[in-house]
Image (tube, rainbow, N blue to C red):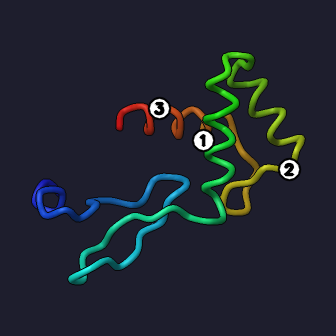
Amino acid sequence: MLEKARSGIYPSHAPVGYRNADGANGKRIIIPDRDTAPAVADLFERFATGKYSLDALVAELRAEGTTLHGHKLSTGTARRTLARMNRW
């Protein structure tokens, strides 16, 4: 995995909101997933306001029908998504 990262190849499955794709020279890259990226962006924007607890935000997004890959948004998925992106 370290060798892949040094070569500019994303070394694992794409995070939520992105998808793996073939890039230049046959390298695997990640690109925004047009189906899930808007929901992930909305999650970040609303959470950043500080107006919501994570549970309240997930409840609101679920009530609005927000899904990721056809599944209702869960608190665990939202927590992992926010935490993973925070490390970048």
Q: Quadrant of the N terminus?
A: bottom left
Image coordinates of residue 17 in percent, x first then y, are 55, 55
Quadrant of the rendered image containing residue 31: bottom left
Asked if disc 1 and disc 3 are in contact, CB closer than 8 Å, the reply is no
Asked if disc 2 and disc 3 are in contact, CB closer than 8 Å, the reply is no
Q: Secondary structure at mark 2?
A: loop
| Badge 2 density bin: few <14, some 14–19, many ≥20, Cα 10 Å | few
| Badge 1 density bin: few <14, some 14–19, many ≥20, Cα 10 Å | some
- Give me the C-alpha separation between circle 1 and circle 2: 15 Å
Identify the residue under disc 2: 65
Q: Which residue type carries mark 3?
A: Ala
Quadrant of the rendered image containing residue 23: bottom left
Q: Which residue type carries mark 2?
A: Gly
Image coordinates of residue 66 in percent, x first then y, are 79, 49
Q: Residue at x 73, y 20 (%)?
A: 52
Image coordinates of residue 61 in percent, x first then y, are 80, 39
Identify the residue under disc 1: 77
- Give me the C-alpha separation between circle 1 and circle 3: 10 Å
- Give me the C-alpha separation between circle 2 and circle 3: 23 Å
Which numbered circle lies on residue 83?
3
Mark found first going from the N terminus, 1 or 3: 1
Q: Is residue 24 left or right of residue 77?
A: left
Total number of numbered discs in the rendering: 3
